[in-house]
Amino acid sequence: MSETKLDTAFEPILAMLAAAPPVSSLAPEEARALWADADMGEKEAVWRVRDMDVPGASGAIAARFYCPARPTAFILYLHGGGWVLGDLAQHDPAIRAFANRTGAAILSINYRLAPEHPFPAGLDDGYAALKWCHAHRDELVGAAAPLLVAGDSAGGNLAAVLALEARNRGGPPVHGQLLIYPAIDGRCDTPSWRENAHCPLLTSRDMAWYWNQYAGQGDRRDPRLSPCEARDHAGLPPAVLAIAGIDPLRDEGLNYADQLARAGNEVTVLRYASLPHGFFNFAHVSDRAAMAFDEIAAATRRLIAAAPDSTAEG
């Protein structure tokens, strides 16, 4: 593991994980059950929270809409979990807090999970949901509200690819992307993959297992799997990347930030050397993670404030 010292507030979580088998040794349904009862923190009150169904690529998918009293933006959020785990309930505390901190309305979706629904099912659901957000933005948030994509880990992968897909397909217009310790490179071969191979909340072996469940026999050089492989990164929305220091995915996130910046995009990088992969959902256990959560929210508010008035798009 990295020589950087892990925030000691995570020790109770590490003890829980030490008593459990590695995710990579489990069947997908067993891995989901392992995390089903994890303590994800208290649920903050949000002005309005509503469960709904929205169109996916192959039928309706469950979604949860969070709306502050005066929303400043509309964010489509793709949860993490290696494309295999995670749902609306597990990310609910973090999304509630993030809606309150950013002032943005957020739609969190239950995109289809692998291996039952491998690539590109989750991505296709995300793009369908993005189109729905654009179509319903006026009635839900207001026509002037910028539309952003966001996600953590595997959800960060989906958010990054959605930004590319929206550009390549001529819409919907995306005004910002928030990528929290994203999975970017399916080659799984960076120094941090080796340095942080035994990261307590995500080992390299487990991340490789997640990639196998999602990508299957797909070509990992496909930019819809590995957004770093896109031929051209120009013309993408401004990005905020939040990078955990103790994480196999650290370097690919930093590399992607560099790719985006070299292509002329506006990029903000937030680095958290003492925090592990997954910290966004554990702000309730660590003061340092709570500070990082608030910093990510502040950077997102700046991203929103800098976005053009979306009514000018016609």
Image (cartoon, rainbow, N blue to C red):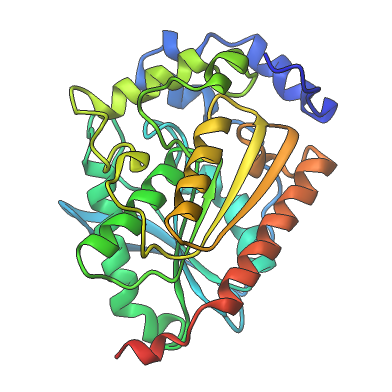
Q: Position of residue 201 (x, y in %)?
A: 61, 24
Asked whether the viewer can see residue 54, the reply is no
Q: What residue is at 68 percent from the left and 31 percent from the top?
A: 245
Q: Nearer the viewer, residue 259 or 282?
A: 259
Quadrant occupied by the C terminus = bottom left
Q: Nearer the viewer, residue 311 or 232?
A: 232
Q: Nearer the viewer, residue 77 or 55?
A: 77
From what the image shows, is residue 68 above or below residue 123?
below
Asked whether the viewer can see residue 215, the reply is yes
The answer to which quarter of the image holds residue 67 is bottom right
Q: Position of residue 71 (x, y in %)?
A: 56, 80
Q: Position of residue 153 (x, y in %)?
A: 49, 38
- In-image side of 196 versus 5 (left or right): left
Q: What residue is at 84 percent from the left and 25 percent from the top?
A: 8
Q: What residue is at 27 percent from the left and 68 percent from the top?
A: 131
Q: Position of residue 205 (x, y in %)?
A: 47, 13
From what the image shows, is residue 164 above or below residue 11?
below
Extreme-left residue of the structure: 58
- In-image side of 20 versus 185 (left or right): right
| Number of marks drawn | 0
The answer to which quarter of the image holds residue 312 is bottom left
Quadrant occupied by the N terminus = top right
The answer to which quarter of the image holds residue 129 is bottom left
Q: Nearer the viewer, residue 55 or 301?
A: 301
